[in-house]
Image: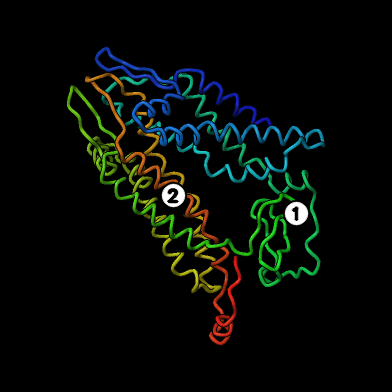
Amino acid sequence: MALALSALIALLLAVSFPFISFSVSGVGNRIELSQTATTLIGFHQPLVAIAVIMTIAVLPAVYLLGVLWLQFGLLRDHPLPFSRSIARSLAHLTPWMMADVFIIGALVSLIKIAGLADIELGISFWAFCAFALLLLMTTQSIDADWMWFSLEGEPLAPEGTKTGLPAAEQGLTGCPTCGLINRLSSQGRGHCVRCHEKLHQRLPQSLQRTWALLTASAIMYIPANVYPIMTTTSLGSSTPSTIIGGVVQLLQMGSWPIAAVIFIASVIVPVGKLVALTWLCLVVKRSNLLNAQSRTRLYRLTEFIGRWSMVDVFVVAILVALIRAGSLMSITPGPAALAFGSVVVLTMLAAMSFDPRLIWDLPLPTPLRRKAATKEPVDG
C-alpha cells in the first residue's frame, strides 16, 4: 500500500511539471508528459496517442488505485465492495503497463537529439523515473496467493482430486487468475468458485485465434518497415526515416549501444515473436514430455519480451512533441508508427490467445487416435 501510494504521488508530480525542454539557435520548446500523446492527435494519429497515454499513465493509475482499494480493505479485515473484481483485473492490467519501456524510449530520444540541441530534463522526467521504479516494486510486492486467501479464503480442492495425475483427465483445471483448482462441467467449461474467472479445459479455438492474430501482425509488419516512422525537417529540408534507417543513423552517430537496443526491440523481438509463436502453433500437436518444458520456457519468454517493442513508438511520441521549431527543426510522425504499434499489440494478443497447456497434451497412440476420430467433437 505504501509503494502504491508513493507511485501515485510520483505520477501526479510527473504530469504536473515540465518533462523535457530543448533549444537550438535561440529557438526551443518545452513539453509536459501528457503532450507526448496529445501532440500525436494533431498529426492525425489518435490511435497511437491513445496507446501511449493508456500504457504510460492511465492503466498504471487504475492499477495503483485498485491496489490501494484492496489493501485498505484488507488492513481493516473487511474487504471493500468490488474487491474480488478489482483483484481479478490486476492480473489482466499488468502486461499493458509500460512505464519502464517509456523510460528507455525517453533515453533513446535524448541520445538521438543530444548532438543537435541543448536538452534540459525537467522535474517531471525524474518524477516519472521514480514512478516507473515504484510501479515495478508495487507489482513485485503483491503476493497473489496471500491476497486471494485474505479476500475469499482457500476452498478445498474438489472431492476425488488425485495428485500426481493430469488435471484434464480428472475434469479439473487451475484458475489462471487466482490459482484455485476447480472442477469443470461435462462441456469442459465453468467459473472459478473463488474469483469467478471463466474457465476452460483448453481455450476454445486457441490455435485459430493465434494464427489469425499472427497473420494480421505479419501483414502489418510490412508497412511498419516500408513506410517512414517519422520525418525530420531541418532548415527546410525533410528527411523521412524508417525503423532500419533510424538504426543506421544511430550507428553513424557512434551510438551503437542505443542502435542495438532499437534493433533488438524493433526488429529482433517482433520477428522473433512471430517465428516463435508460429513454430509453437505448428509443433504443438507433436509434443512430448522431453521437449514440452523447453517449449513452455520459449512461450514464457515470448510472452514476456513482447511489450518492449513499444520503445520505437514511444521514441516517436516524445520526439514529435518535443522537436517543434518550425522549418528550423521539427519531427512529424509517419504512417509506420500506427502500423508498428499494431504489430506490438497484435503479437501480445497472439501470445495471450495461445494456450500453453496444449504443449503438454501428448498425442494419442495411433489405435486410440483412430477410435477418437470416430467420435463427435466436443466444443471447447
Q: Which mark, by number, is residue 346?
A: 2
Could you tell me residue 334's position as x and y percent? Answer: 29, 36
Q: Quadrant of the N terminus?
A: top right
Viewer-closest of 242 and 342: 342
Q: Which mark sits nearer the N-terminus, 2 or 1?
A: 1
> Which residue position holds label 1?
193
Could you tell me residue 218's position as x and y percent? Answer: 36, 54
Q: Is residue 145 left or right of residue 99?
A: right
Residue at position x 46%, y 64% from top? Answer: 280
Q: 10 Å neighbourhood of mark 2: few (<14), some, or many (≥20)?
A: many
Q: What amino acid type should be assigned to the residue bearing mark 2?
A: Leu
Mark 2 lies on a secondary structure that is: helix
From the viewer's perspective, is residue 313 above or below residue 237? below
Residue at position x 45%, y 34% from top? Answer: 52
Residue at position x 54%, y 77% from top? Answer: 363
Tag 2 and tag 1, C-beta contact below 8 Å: no
Q: Which mark, by number, is residue 324?
A: none
Viewer-closest of 357 and 253: 357
